[in-house]
Amino acid sequence: MPKIQREKHPMPAVDVLVEGIIKGDTSALGRAITLVESNRKDHLEKANAIVQKCLSRSRDAIRIGITGVPGVGKSTFIETLGTLLIAEGNRVAVLAVDPTSTQSKGSILGDKTRMEELVKNPNAFIRPSPSGETLGGVARKTRETIILCEAAGYSIVLIETVGVGQSETAVHGMVDFFLLLKLSGAGDELQGIKRGIVEMADALVVNKADGENIKKAEAAAKAFKRALHLYPPKENGWIPKALTCSATENTGIDTVWDMILDYIEKNKASGNFLEKRKRQNRNWLYESIEERLKSEFFQDEVIAPEIEKFVTEVMADTISPFHAAEQLIGMFKNKS
Ligand code: GDP
């Protein structure tokens, strides 16, 4: 039986929520994110209005993407880095992009139980991945959530994603710095990296450089460094770095942070920081248009049964797929 959604506490008006967010009230922030994550039309309208008002309020936050295979130590790394950043006077938001999470399973990433210390810290805000969504849906919701968190005064937004599939590309498209966490293997480091992800990463950090693993981790970082030099520098001139750290022992994390700050400073000075954000916004606009057009088309009541008919014909080879597409799009256009 479908769950009946009962609103125990009615949703406050847009202006009330915006005011709360700007004051740094986490309950207002949480409720606004709930609106952003909802698929209800009235919620979407409210969410749009809130995001719009928060846009100009976004402060000078830094957005960092963190990826790596399950077990590499992402949540431990975020816990250690987040605690360090808060100790330096920052407020830190942790979001997750995990399109595999479903309503029933709950989400794997950004799970509060995985960041025990951070979750207790009043200067940290942790939000798991929106669940039961396509990657496009999760990406939109996370992007808007970033804006809300920044308006609420979180100066650093960490976005966690699993190093499998397309979700890294989506996260790369919404952050200023993209960090890939790695483990040291048995000399097979170079084969272990997917080409695409190396091109996206601004740094490779070999985690678990502790105990007996230190030497292996350092050798892995050296091998990565050599490999990274084989790639052309990024358009902003940055050569991706390879470092080691131990998230459990809290070693090397400060060096990772210094490197990120160095990157941010250099890119701000050259103008690349803002340029990249502008490019990301432009891409987001195009992606949003594509998503919207596709869903309007495929979910159209009149068109949906027509698509079925054409599928049958195309499969029977009685009409070419191209011609069928033209006819369907013609029908869709003539409707409006
Ligand atoms: P995630 O799946 O990438 O988020 O990985 P977790 O943060 O959950 O870590 C997976 C396991 O690796 C846990 O048992 C952690 O305690 C352990 N771990 C994480 N970071 C380190 C580290 O720096 N050194 C060691 N030795 N273990 C670590």
Image: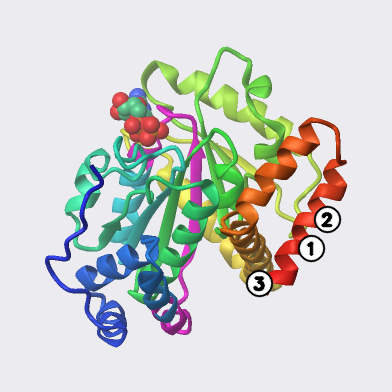
Q: Secondary structure at mark 3?
A: helix
Element assignment for label 1: helix
Q: CA distance from mark 1 to mark 2?
A: 6 Å
Asked if residue 87 shows in the view, the reply is: no
Report the residue at 57% width, 63% height from top: 264
Task: Answer whether residue 74 is magenta in the image.
Answer: yes
Mark 2 or mark 3: name the one nearer the start of the chain.
Answer: 3
- Label placed on residue 326: 2
Q: Is residue 174 left or right of residue 318?
A: left
Q: For residue 72, which quarter of the picture?
A: top left
Assess mark 1: CB under 8 A from ligand 1?
no
Circles 1 and 2: CB atoms closer than 8 Å: yes
Give the magenta part as a residue range.
50-77
Q: Amino acid at mark 1?
A: Gly
Residue underneath mark 1: 330
State the mark number for residue 278: 3
Whole-percent x and y of residue 152? 33, 74
Res 132 → quadrant: top left
Instruction: Indicate the amino acid at tag 3.
Output: Lys
